[in-house]
């Protein structure tokens, strides 16, 4: 019986023995530290690994409930600055700026329209809203902001030729005039049509000058009216006398009429 | 995708026309001014057997697989590489696979690749098949290179982007005997930073390191003395990425 007990006990590890060192016993049975397969961990080690796992921080307010940080767009883009400068120049240099809605047009129609407008010295400019809006909001043209919403184009010109522009645009159904800024005056579509009906500035000026100069021009004729009337009456009288006396020599009436001048 | 702004003016009967395209942002091409290509851009051929083959058969010494790598953990010449996330042995077949795959996929005029592991130097013995135990140690069968976790295997560089290099590096990384990932310089820095952040913002007051160093609850009875350095992140040849 003691032999069998010894045999049975010495067969499998010896945990019953006091002072059991894992270094000695585990070398005998079990694999090495580094194995190709996933070596089974001691249960105590498993518990330790479970206890010492990573715990992520949990703030009181989850980050997805807070407002997202708006990433500020970089304005150092040189291209954006160039386009803004161009828009500012356009608004500074041109007298008439018309904003139109632009729907898709065939390419050749666009070219034709540009050609006709170019003949009247009107340029067509395509601008992006995201560039125009900041420029306008900082300049004096703030009231034009509601026009720059969807796809649009600018028709700019140094002279205010509204009539020719409207005529060309009438032939192009895809472009609708929204509003215009002529000589720093904002006009709606109706206003542009009324403006087109007005005569040209030079003609209006000429008319005004003519109307004003009408009275002074009449002054000299008014002053001369009396003497001219007298001269005319005397001439008539002379003619009547000459007609009455058929052969009598001419009176010195012309000397009298020349003295009246 | 940025959220749409509030409508600039109230929509009319036709609805609001959403702008389809904004200003095109021109991106400058990458600047490769500081990059010089070495003379031999392709990977060197690695020998199966070292020039002076070993006469004396060596013990297994599996500790060259265990734990974190101390050499070749950072980039030297290249910008992208394959990082080993576990320990293992690379033999000549692996070397040939890496060399040929990378050589096939890269452009030798604009890119270069270098080895970060030495040629096989460690002899591995094998007994002939079908024999019983005993009769001494077997003869040397082949040579291998030991790779620990955190070591770079190959480095690729030159006038190229990570996106161009990643496909064939992942292809190679999947075929290696240990888990591996393609990384760039920034990616590696990012990984290390994240690890550090994780270690710092861990809400668990009980860490493996703390338990082991102070031998709480007599845990060292069940742990190896190497766990003082390995700190629960390594188990055998495996690297436990999710720990601490």
Image (cartoon, coloured by chain):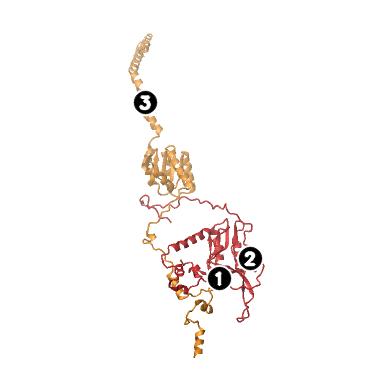
Chain colours: A orange, B red
- How far across and down, in percent of the image, does residue B37 sit? 61, 56
Instruction: Kindly indicate the quadrant of the structure image that contains residue A246.
Output: top left
- Residues tagged by mark 1 and mark 3 found on one chain of the structure: no
Which residue is denoted by mark 2 in the rendering?
B46
Which residue is denoted by mark 3 in the rendering?
A213
- Residues tagged by mark 3 and mark 2 found on one chain of the structure: no
Instruction: Identify the element where label 2 is drawn.
Output: loop
User: From the viewer's perspective, is B16 left or right of B131?
Assistant: left
Instruction: Identify the element where label 3 is drawn.
Output: helix
Q: CA separation, marks 1 and 3? A: 115 Å
Q: CA separation, marks 3 and 2? A: 107 Å
Work out whether B139 lies above or below A185: below
Q: Residues within 10 Å of mark 3 (few under 14, many from 20)?
A: few
Chain holding disc 1: B
Q: Residues within 10 Å of mark 2 (few under 14, many from 20)?
A: some
- How far across and down, in percent of the image, does residue B76 sit? 57, 58
């Amino acid at each position: 019986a003691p032999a069998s007990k010894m045999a049975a006990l010495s067969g499998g590890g010896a945990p019953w023995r006091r002072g059991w060192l894992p270094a000695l016993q585990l070398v005998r049975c079990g694999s090495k530290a580094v194995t190709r397969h996933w070596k089974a961990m001691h249960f105590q080690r498993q518990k330790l690994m479970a206890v010492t796992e990573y715990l992520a921080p949990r703030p009181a307010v989850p980050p997805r409930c807070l407002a997202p940080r708006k990433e500020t767009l970089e304005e150092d883009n040189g291209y954006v600055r160039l386009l803004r400068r161009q828009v500012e120049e356009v608004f500074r240099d041109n007298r008439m700026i018309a904003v139109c809605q632009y729907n898709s047009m065939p390419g050749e129609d666009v070219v034709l329209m540009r050609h006709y407008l170019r003949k009247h010295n009107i340029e067509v400019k395509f601008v992006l809203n995201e560039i125009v809006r900041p420029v306008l909001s900082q300049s004096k043209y703030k009231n034009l902001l509601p026009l720059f919403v969807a796809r649009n184009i600018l028709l700019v010109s140094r002279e205010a030729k509204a009539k020719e522009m409207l005529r060309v645009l009438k032939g192009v159904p895809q472009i609708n005039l929204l509003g215009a800024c002529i000589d720093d005056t904002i006009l709606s579509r109706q206003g542009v049509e009324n403006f087109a009906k007005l005569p040209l500035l030079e003609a209006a000026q000429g008319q005004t000058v003519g109307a004003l100069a009408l009275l002074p021009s009449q002054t000299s004729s008014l002053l001369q009216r009396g003497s001219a009337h007298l001269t005319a009456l005397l001439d008539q009288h002379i003619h009547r006398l000459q007609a009455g006396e058929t052969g009598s020599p001419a009176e010195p009436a012309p000397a009298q009429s020349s003295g009246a001048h | 995708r940025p959220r749409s702004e509030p409508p600039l003016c109230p929509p009319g009967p036709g609805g609001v026309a959403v702008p389809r395209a904004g200003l095109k942002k021109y991106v400058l091409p990458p600047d490769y001014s500081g990059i010089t290509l070495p003379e031999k851009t392709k990977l060197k051929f690695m020998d199966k057997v070292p020039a002076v083959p070993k006469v004396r058969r060596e013990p297994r010494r599996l500790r060259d697989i265990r734990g974190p790598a101390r050499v070749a953990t950072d980039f030297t010449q290249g910008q992208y590489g394959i990082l080993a996330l576990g320990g293992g042995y690379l033999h000549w077949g692996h070397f040939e696979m890496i060399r040929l795959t990378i050589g096939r996929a890269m452009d030798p005029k604009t890119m270069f690749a270098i080895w970060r592991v030495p040629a096989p130097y460690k002899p591995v013995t094998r007994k002939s098949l079908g024999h019983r135990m005993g009769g001494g140690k077997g003869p040397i069968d082949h040579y291998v290179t030991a790779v620990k976790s955190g070591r770079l295997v190959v480095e690729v560089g030159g006038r190229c982007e990570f996106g161009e290099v990643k496909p064939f590096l992942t292809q190679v990384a999947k075929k290696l005997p240990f888990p591996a990932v393609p990384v760039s310089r920034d990616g590696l820095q990012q990984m290390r930073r994240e690890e550090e952040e994780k270690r710092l913002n861990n809400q668990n007051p009980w860490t493996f390191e703390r338990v082991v160093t102070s031998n709480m609850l007599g845990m060292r009875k069940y742990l190896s003395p190497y766990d003082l350095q390995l700190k629960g992140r390594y188990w055998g040849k495996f690297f436990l990425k999710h720990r601490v």
